[in-house]
Image (tube, coloured by chain):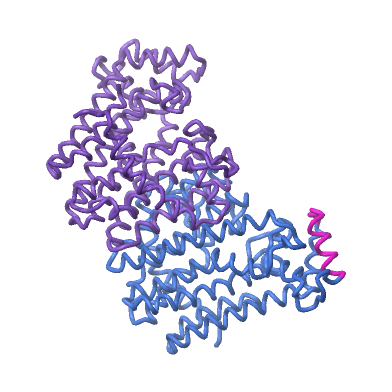
Chain colours: A purple, B blue
Amino acid sequence: MPDIGFPAGALARCRRLLEPAMRATVADLHPWTERMAAFTLGWSDIDGTPVEADTGKGLRPALAMLCAEAAGGSFESALPGAVAVELVHVFSLVHDDIIDSDERRRHRPAVWKAYGVGPAVLAGDALLALAVRSAASGPHAAAAASLLSSALVELVHGQTLDMAFEERPWTGPEAVTVAEYTSMAADKTGSLIGCAAALGVTFAGAPAGLATRMYGMGRDLGLAFQMVDDVLGIWGDPARTGKPVFGDLRRRKKTLPVLAALAPSGPRSSGSAGTSASRELALLLSSGAEDEDAVRLAADLIEKEGGRDRALSMAADHASRALDTLDAAFPEARDLRALITSLLDRTH
Amino acid sequence: MPDIGFPAGALARCRRLLEPAMRATVADLHPWTERMAAFTLGWSDIDGTPVEADTGKGLRPALAMLCAEAAGGSFESALPGAVAVELVHVFSLVHDDIIDSDERRRHRPAVWKAYGVGPAVLAGDALLALAVRSAASGPHAAAAASLLSSALVELVHGQTLDMAFEERPWTGPEAVTVAEYTSMAADKTGSLIGCAAALGVTFAGAPAGLATRMYGMGRDLGLAFQMVDDVLGIWGDPARTGKPVFGDLRRRKKTLPVLAALAPSGPRSSGSAGTSASRELALLLSSGAEDEDAVRLAADLIEKEGGRDRALSMAADHASRALDTLDAAFPEARDLRALITSLLDRTH
């Protein structure tokens, strides 16, 4: 399926509907929190001056709307769900940057860096409150609130696992396994993307069984998305990702390419002691060296150990599982399929 | 109505039901967040050792259960709502202490002080996620999720107003008025207490009209409660409140007794320039003096200007309005009435 043109078309359609609804929702906030929200959403500068900043990909709301359409509803019918998942996503970014002490986001200062930690905590809480209220409005409130709150519990669980991984060693019996990583990413990234898809069909009036299947589809899609993100976090172009080159390596994040390279079950290693390259990588990561040469060498060793390939191959597996579920449920949903394949094209 | 015996009876009944439900809910968290939650809820020490600490008054869940009973339901029927409001309350305390940089809570370190800011942000988020999931479960999910999320939006709005008040001057046209204070307190404290009462009758199957009246009743009760709290924050016994003596004055919080003492419309002042005592108070507060003599003098001036009396009289007005609404809806609800009057007895 040709990628060109699609996201510009369907994503633009989603955005035209979504943005006024988002603005109307955020307008209920106190002017102070509203300013922080507008900055976070890329609508204005730190001081409130309107700008055209990067507003993010809008994947989750687009998924909700396209799933509603696929299930026989309209884009509009899914708006409360689309607004809810986008607000939860933005809430999680605002709080995540505090938790991880990340100072930059999408080429701009993080909210806590721009306005202070206390106000940023409050801004995140305000966005989350609006998200829940949006999901709990309208004719499918009970199912929507249940889906959103379950996804929220999983999302926070995933963030906690991610944080707990930082305390674990790189090698040995206490090391984080690829399976543990997958479970963390399914919670942290998969749950909300799954929720977006499930909310979409729910607001279109689909039965709970279809919502459950779409939740699983979105969860696989989210896993694929996160795995690709991990690859981009090491080898991506900083101008496109908005993140520093080798940033995740410098911060010693336990991302999939690193864990896959260190895993005894990795495709190119044999035996529990690992190859000499994987031993060198583990030593390098444990040393705490943050200079350009050290992180570049680490990236090379990860690639040599097959970490990059394995991450991309796992991403492809989850993506094709998501597409299989989608095709079984909605064989005619071309726009939805195109959105999903375009997301995975980020690997190239 | 005699106060003795009641809370020990009905509150203990609520707690016996509530605590196992709270423990079962919190058990779904990651062990790390669960430990922070258990500390926050007074079940364990910082390192996880079980203790019998102050678990809070449990006002909100008790109100939900007693309202359910008054509306013809059982205590048990209101449990998802009771758990939800208690979790939202605890979430707000955890995040509030970060926002206000408060280092102590209920005679113990604040969560952020004990575990760090990032983990405390996450612990609050986890409690909030569980709260929403609890409200969104069971047969009245749509109404409950809608009530809870509306209260959440108001609560965060009230916290934001409270924070914004700190930037405002003590006197002049930009000063915070008593009316603005009342609106802030209605959002910050009234909304969740109103929500507790409304959820109670909702889970008992009462129509939306009754839930709305109970929301108004709880909002008045919450206002009375907050106004009494403001008085205790200045003149309360630190051994009972768990807060330092004159703490709110030392932190220059814009609480009701201070605002009422400074207000041109205050009962003992005349003309916009105020009395000499109110001018002395304004100067003292603006000076930033934090020593014992300065805050004691400020407290005396507030009392002399009628700030304490006016706060207590406003609290009594809201309390009697709450009781009128209650009596009109549930003339036979003796336990519920006793809970409410016992709360207001804190003034003596």
Residue A67 in the image: state x and y as whole percent. 23, 47
Question: Would you say A212 lies left or right of B292 here?
Answer: left
Reply yes or no: does residue B290 show up in magenta. yes
Query: Which quadrant of the figure contains the N terminus of chain B?
Result: bottom right
Res. B290 image quadrant: bottom right
- What residue do we see at 55% from left, 79% from top? B342
- What residue do we see at 46% from left, 27% from top? A243
User: Considering depth in this image, is B154 or A295 the residue closer to the camera?
Assistant: B154
Question: Would you say A129 lies left or right of A173 here?
Answer: right
What span is colored magenta in the figure?
A: B276-291
Q: Is residue A125 visible?
A: yes
User: Considering depth in this image, is B128 or B37 the residue closer to the camera?
Assistant: B128
Residue A235 in the image: state x and y as whole percent. 38, 20
Q: How many marks?
A: 0
Query: Which quadrant of the figure contains the C terminus of chain B?
Result: bottom right
Res. A145 image quadrant: bottom left
- What residue do we see at 35% from left, 51% from top? B28
Q: Is residue B49 visible?
A: no
Residue B16 vs A3, above or below: the answer is below
Residue A267 in the image: state x and y as whole percent. 23, 18
- What residue do we see at 18% from left, 52% from top? A72
Reply yes or no: does residue A216 show up in magenta. no
Question: Would you say B177 lies left or right of B305 here?
Answer: left
Residue B133 vs A97, above or below: the answer is below
User: Considering depth in this image, is B55 or A85 the residue closer to the camera?
Assistant: A85
Residue B107 vs B115, above or below: the answer is below
Residue A268 vs B265, above or below: the answer is above
Residue A42 in the image: state x and y as whole percent. 48, 40
Dominant secondary structure of the residues highlighted in magenta in the image: helix
